[in-house]
Amino acid sequence: MNPRGPSAKERRTNHDRQSPGCFARRLGRCPQAVLAKEKEFNRLRDGLSAQRRTLPWERAEKPSVLDGPDGRESLADLFAGRSQLVVYHFMLAPDWTEGCKGCSFWADNFNGIDIHLAHRDVTLLAISSAPLEKINAYKQRMGWSFKWVSSAGCDFNHNYHVTFARDEIERGDIFYNYTWTKASDTERPGISVFYKAEDGTLYHTYSIYARGLDMMNTAYHYLDLVLKDRDEAGLRYPMEWLRWHDKYED
């Protein structure tokens, strides 16, 4: 310990540590530049959302009868008295023993928000091609509360390009994410949005697939804030680290 007290350099260092400006300097040489980019990104995102809402609507004319907790329901019934419906196409095929790991990660991020969306005239639910009994068992295992219905026996998931027949896979090309591509599985993830007009006419207004779903995963966006980011660069595929939330060893 210096008997004469801290030196001038030490006093300046201590002052810097307590100074609000020091926090900014430690974050980066020019945090204002990052902030400006974040604001521009938000403006671009708002603009993109506005542009998305101007896309032409497609009448949802093909009849679909789905199996849910309230019995057999049409697409119109799923709106539950609201004018807007958001469907998460959850990958759970009839012959699978459990739901897709990635879809389960996404579901962990939207479970519980349906009550908030309902107060903005939006119904949120999931649809899978597996039978309802399998859906209910998996939903109970994962502890989720959102509504989840089965499209078994109808073409709903196929109509919105997320479930494919085995012969389509064998032919080598499927239409997914607005393009023709290769596939090895009969299921793909997506989100479809619908609107019910005052006269009861149903419209499909938009669907997003693949990396477009990224913005719906809150956990990933928290990881984007931390120093290690998503920390997936050295993995064989991006979500190799991921487990079902009841299968992590700790």
Image: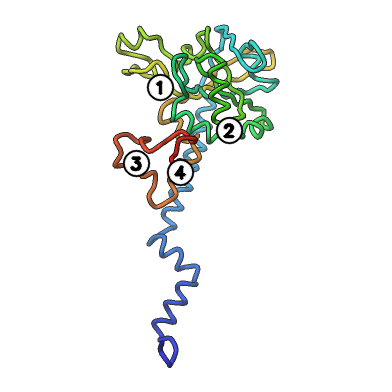
Image quarter hosting the C terminus: top left
CA separation, marks 1 and 3? 24 Å
Nearer the N terminus, badge 1 or badge 3?
1
Residue 248: percent from left, percent from top: 44, 39
Q: Which residue is mark 4?
A: 250
Quadrant of residue 220 in the image?
top left
Please state which amino acid type lies under the numbered disc 3: Glu
Q: Quadrant of residue 4?
A: bottom left
Cα distance in 3D space between marks 4 and 2:
22 Å
Q: CA distance from mark 3 to mark 4?
A: 20 Å
Which is nearer the N-term, disc 2 or disc 1? 2
**Dot label at residue 111:** 2
Reading the image, the residue beneath label 1 is 177
Report the residue at 63% width, 31% height from top. Answer: 114
Work out which quarter of the rendered image holds the N terminus and state it. Answer: bottom left
Type of amino acid at the residue the image marks with label 4: Asp
Residue type (three-letter) at the residue carrying disc 1 = Asn
Compared across the picture, whether 136 is left or right of 35 comes to: right
Seen as rendered, the residue at the extreme bottom is 4
